[in-house]
Image: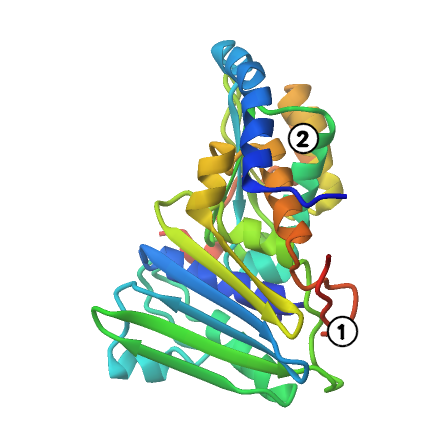
Amino acid sequence: MAKLTLDDLRKLRDAKKSEIETRSAEGKEAEIIIGMGTCGIAAGAKSTLDAFIDELGGKGITSVSVKQTGCMGFCANEPTVEIRVPEMPTTIYGNVNADIARKIVNDHIIGKKLVSDHVFDKPSVDIIK
Amino acid sequence: MHYAVADYMLDIVENAIDAGSAVITVDLIDDGEFIKVCIGDNGPGMSEETLKKVRDPFYTDGKKHKSRKVGLGIPFVEQAAQTSGGEFDLRSEEGLGSSVYFTFKKDHIDCPPLGDIPGTVVSMMMFGKEYELVFNNSTTGGRFVVLRSELIDALGSLNDAESLILAKRYIAEHGIHTAEDKGESKWRN
């Protein structure tokens, strides 16, 4: 099978563009921000990222933005993930492994319900002023 | 401690992005005997004094988290390289940038697995800042170069799942090291 080229990528992007624009116009944008500092990487944040991408891709969800940042300051609770969904409180989750990442997609982003066991609402004691 | 070579690479690249570098180059070379990684940036660089301190795990500049007393990224990779019969070198010049070079001896028992290189390269490219990243992969079987800007140009962004999956597939198909084994690389055709 021929290798995927940059032109192929452009064509695939153009094919899905109208679909993305339709969804964006509906105001359904959500954001997933994954902490990818030393602590996050050591705790397996890359597997967490892979699980988010796989779950969103498998469900054909393109209206969710997946981003990375460095250490959020919650090293003892890595991997940490911030979720922003319209009409819901911005939420930071701690100890997000691949299974929890998939649960966040299904429960929080799609179902609009918090994954309560992993809500991380207090920063680590050493960064509280 | 990190698990794979890819993790060490991602960690150092994140440092470069966090430091505000506009251009980052990542060379991943497999010469048959060693896995060699060189990550360079044009960020603010470090003074000679800071350069000595960053190899100490109990040093951090404190700019991001004022109460933190550790900085583990550089010490992790230095230790991992040295325990697997490899080398580590860190150079920097204020106002010009920094470069980190590390190697792992492939047949050493402590050589870490390569890890998910295609996924990690995509991960290196999806931090929320403006920067160029050039990834160069050379092995005894060939060479592959990909730029962050060309993937963004082709895909529109690197933030939605479909684009990220396509970017990873593109990188994997063009001959990146596979990572199923301990440091053994393959050129995929």
Q: Where is residue B154? Give x, y as percent.
A: 49, 36
Q: Is residue B46 left or right of residue A127?
A: left
Secondary structure of the residue carrying tag 1 is loop
Nearer the viewer's eye, disc 1 or disc 2?
A: 1
User: Image quarter for residue B179?
Assistant: bottom right
Secondary structure of the residue carrying tag 2 is helix
Q: Is residue A111 left or right of residue B126?
A: right
Residue A24 seen = yes
Residue at image point 29% right, 63% down? B43
Q: Where is residue A125? Give x, y as percent.
A: 48, 55
Which one is in front, A52 or B142? B142
Marking on residue B182: 1
Residue that sits furthest to the front in the current view: A2
Report the coloring of the rendering. rainbow
Q: Where is residue B30? Give x, y as percent.
A: 62, 75
Which quadrant is the N terminus of chain B positioned in?
Answer: bottom right
Q: Where is residue B109? Give x, y as percent.
A: 76, 85
Mark 2 Cα shell of 10 Å, populated few (<14), some (14-19), many (≥20)? many
Kindly identify which residue carries mark 2. A56
